[in-house]
């Protein structure tokens, strides 16, 4: 196989396998946050920004995979 | 003097990254044009050089962001008084929020007050830089050859690596200025060698030295993770908008709107996450070298 098609395959595989675990983790974080906000609706306004920050930190793992895929595609 | 050390570290790293990235510029241009017809390139376009310092289009955009922040603050100060105006109360809310977060991370109120300007600079600069693509006409100014005159500053990996280096190397320099040997003792744990009495102590000493080396690698991992998080989020937002516009001629209108909205939200969140993580790292290293005063 030529290098070009291997590059495309590598980038696609990198992204698709790499976001499986961060997606599961983000779903768990959001689920727990929904449960806690349902138990204690008045504290929901304090919980929501903290959930967003936790989601951003877990999402960074998927972003690392994206950076590797972009490097494969755009910078040899 | 500490500022000079941090600035020289950041400039050498930025030069190294731009040289690495400029070497791949040829491949990037041809790959990008063969892909979608639109220009999206990883390294930023060199405008001119001052000595050996390359001024790229993202450096120019970062200067413009600084000018925007200065104009905003001067506007907020104009009618400032005891009864706050709207802009003044926005800035006061940001400052009080960061003072309380810093007090949690650093321990004492004096340290929080002392290091507040650095973190306010981080949050303001990164938040304005992430939203740079919203400014109406600026991004469309193009030079001959097709490259844009301005580029979202944080979509350039050099800029985010420079910010991360300032954050992490700054925390090390601050901890070293308080207590050098105690700080170095976290990473080069040779003090356990002198306490060997039995064979198990020797194994313990070897394990501690290995853990110290892992901590050094962890510091470099912090720099890469901080910079890659910010860069990946913002660059991916830009790439998505460009790709949606390149599908057909009519997809340039209305269709990118949800992605641009997501980009605005992600820009604010990532600015806050960067500053929060820098606060935690700096606070942890300063707390580890100073005895608690209370």
Image (tube, coloured by chain):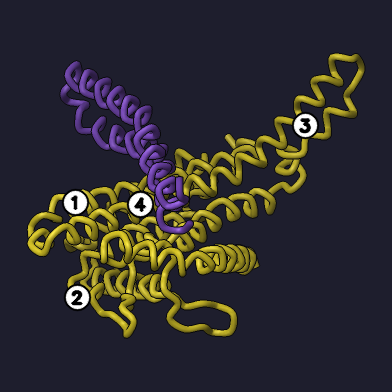
The C terminus of chain B lies in which quarter of the figure? top right
Q: Which chain is purple?
A: A
Question: Which residue sits at x=14%, y=50%?
Answer: B258
Residue at label 4? B271
Tell if the residue under mark 4 belongs to the same chain as the one under mark 3.
yes
| Marks 4/1: CA–CA distance | 18 Å
Q: Position of residue B227 (x, y in %)?
A: 47, 52
Q: Are marks 1 and 2 in contact (CB under 8 Å)?
A: no
Q: Chain of mark 4?
A: B
Q: Is B256 displayed left or right of B72 in the figure?
A: left
User: Is residue B184 depicted above or below B66 in this figure?
Assistant: above
Q: Is B227 displayed left or right of B243 in the figure?
A: right
| Marks 4/3: CA–CA distance | 36 Å
Which mark's residue is nearer the viewer, 3 or 2?
Answer: 2
Q: Chain of mark 3?
A: B
Assess disc 1: are there few (<14), some (14-19) or many (≥20) residues with their C-alpha within 10 Å of its C-alpha.
Answer: some
The N terminus of chain B lies in which quarter of the figure? bottom right
Residue at label 2? B137
Q: Chain of mark 2?
A: B
Q: Secondary structure at mark 1?
A: helix
First in residue order: circle 1 vs circle 2: 2
Q: Secondary structure at mark 4?
A: helix
Q: Which chain is yellow?
A: B
| Pick the front one: B262 or B85 | B262
| Marks 3/1: CA–CA distance | 48 Å
Q: Does the image show residue B132? A: yes
Which mark's residue is nearer the viewer, 4 or 2?
Answer: 2
| Numbered mark located on residue B209 in the image | 3
User: Is residue B265 depicted above or below B158 in this figure?
Assistant: above
């Amino acid at each position: 196989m030529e290098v070009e098609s291997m590059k495309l395959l590598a980038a696609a595989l990198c992204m698709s396998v790499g976001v499986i675990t961060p997606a599961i983790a983000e779903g768990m974080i959001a689920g727990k946050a929904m449960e806690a906000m349902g138990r204690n609706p008045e504290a929901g306004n304090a919980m929501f920004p903290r959930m967003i920050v936790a989601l951003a930190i877990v999402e960074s793992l998927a972003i690392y995979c994206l950076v590797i895929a972009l490097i494969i595609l755009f910078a040899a | 003097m500490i500022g000079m050390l941090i600035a020289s570290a950041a400039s050498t790293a930025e030069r190294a990254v731009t040289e690495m990235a400029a070497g791949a510029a040829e491949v990037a241009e041809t790959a990008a044009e063969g892909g979608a017809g639109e220009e999206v390139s990883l390294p930023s376009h060199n405008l001119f050089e001052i000595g050996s310092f390359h001024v790229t289009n993202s450096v120019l955009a970062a200067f413009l962001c600084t000018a925007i922040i200065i104009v905003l603050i001067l506007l907020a100060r104009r009618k400032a008084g005891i009864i706050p105006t709207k802009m003044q109360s926005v800035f006061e809310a940001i400052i009080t929020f960061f003072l309380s977060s810093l007090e949690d991370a650093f321990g004492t109120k004096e340290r929080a007050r002392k290091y507040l300007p650095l973190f306010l600079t981080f949050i303001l600069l990164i938040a304005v830089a992430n939203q740079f693509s919203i400014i109406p006409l600026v991004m469309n100014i193009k030079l001959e050859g097709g490259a844009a005159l301005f580029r979202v500053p944080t979509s350039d990996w050099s800029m985010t690596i420079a910010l991360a280096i300032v954050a992490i190397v700054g925390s090390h320099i601050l901890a070293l200025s308080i207590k050098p040997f105690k700080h170095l003792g976290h990473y080069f744990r040779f003090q356990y060698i002198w306490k060997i009495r039995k064979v198990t102590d020797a194994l313990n000493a070897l394990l501690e030295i290995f853990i110290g080396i892992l901590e050094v690698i962890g510091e470099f991992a912090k720099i890469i993770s901080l910079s890659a998080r910010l860069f990946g989020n913002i660059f991916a937002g830009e790439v998505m908008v460009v790709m949606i516009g390149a599908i057909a001629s009519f997809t340039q209108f209305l269709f990118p709107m949800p992605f641009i909205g997501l980009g605005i939200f992600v820009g604010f969140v990532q600015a806050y996450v960067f500053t929060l993580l820098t606060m935690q790292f700096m606070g942890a290293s300063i707390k580890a070298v100073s005895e608690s005063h209370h």
